[in-house]
Amino acid sequence: MFFFICRKKMFVKPKGKRPKKVILGANDELVSLQIKVPNKDRNELREEAFRKKVSQSSIMRRVLKDHFIDEKQRRKELGVKLEAILDSCVGWFGGFEIDGEAGFVEKMYAEGLMLNDLTDVQWERVKEHLQIGYNGYGGSVSDYIFNGKFLKLNPSEKQRAWFGYKKDSEESQVINDEIKEEDLINRIKKTELSKGNIELEKEVEDLEGEGEDLDEEEGEEEEEKIEVELVEE
């Protein structure tokens, strides 16, 4: 009598260290979080987890932790830059400069700082200064014009409510178009200025080259005179 034994082929987990246990704080609790990622990223996550002998979840937790650390550092740096800008825009006799290259809007824009990056505490600080700047106009600027100055700094919905305009309003669209046109003009000016500087540098180099050629010609003439004098003697 013959017996045939069929064995089911099973996936054998490679030997190695077990994934490290997650150490939580006294007030921490693990909760489920469902996210969607591209299939390529999912496969790379699996490979990374296998290579490092850790769970996929632990890698994702580390990514989140690093992100929050980076964000905290970024906000700290943002706070330092913001305070420097606010201090620099305060006039000698009070007031707060908003317009021009030395004003709040352009300095924020140049540093890449947007209003929607600010924390609630930072926004309250900014509001105090903006109110001072607004009072400095003495009613010579309409609310429509004043509020439009800050659209290029991407205010949040909450901040837009303080300014008194809506994101998709007709007035906002008009001001956005004006800002785009102003930015385009500024870029053109910078490009023309850069081209002018290049052409000027080229002219200077050409003049210097001509000067060197003249010096060489004068040197050759002097040598000819010396040779003639020697011949006459």
Image (tube, rainbow, N blue to C red):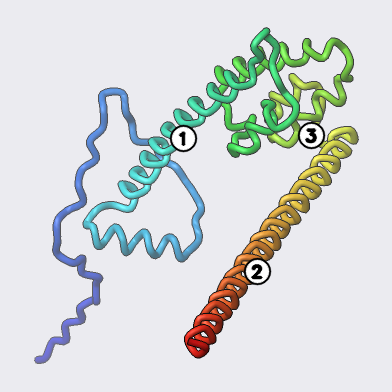
Give the image quarter of residue 45.
Answer: bottom left
> Residue flagged by tag 3: what amino acid is it?
Lys
Contact between labelled residues 2 and 3, with CB atoms less than 8 Å apart: no
Q: Nearer the viewer, mark 1 or mark 2?
A: 2
Judging by the rendered image, the residue that carries numbered circle 1 is 74
Judging by the rendered image, the residue that carries numbered circle 3 is 167
Residue situated furthest front in the rendering: 233
Judging by the rendered image, the residue that carries numbered circle 2 is 206
Q: Does residue 189 appear in this view? A: yes
Give the image quarter of residue 146.
Answer: top right
Q: Nearer the viewer, mark 3 or mark 2?
A: 2
- Secondary element at image label 3: loop
Q: Percent from the top left, x then y, of residue 200?
A: 69, 59
Q: Percent from the top left, x then y, of residue 130?
A: 70, 17
The Cα–Cα distance between marks 1 and 3, rounded to whole angstroms, is 27 Å
The Cα–Cα distance between marks 3 and 2, rounded to whole angstroms, is 54 Å
Q: Quadrant of the N terminus?
A: bottom left
- 181 is higher (above) or lower (below) than 47: above
Q: Nearer the viewer, mark 1 or mark 3?
A: 1
> Residue flagged by tag 2: what amino acid is it?
Asp
Q: Is 167 on the left or on the right of 48, as rendered?
A: right
Residue situated furthest left in the rendering: 1
Contact between labelled residues 3 and 1, with CB atoms less than 8 Å apart: no
Q: Earlier in the sequence, mark 3 or mark 2?
A: 3
* Residue nearer the viewer, 84 or 149: 84
Q: Does residue 155 appear in this view? A: no
- 164 is higher (above) or lower (below) than 67: above
Q: Earlier in the sequence, mark 1 or mark 3?
A: 1
> Could you tell me which residue is drawn at 58 percent across and 37 percent down?
111
> Residue flagged by tag 1: what amino acid is it?
Arg
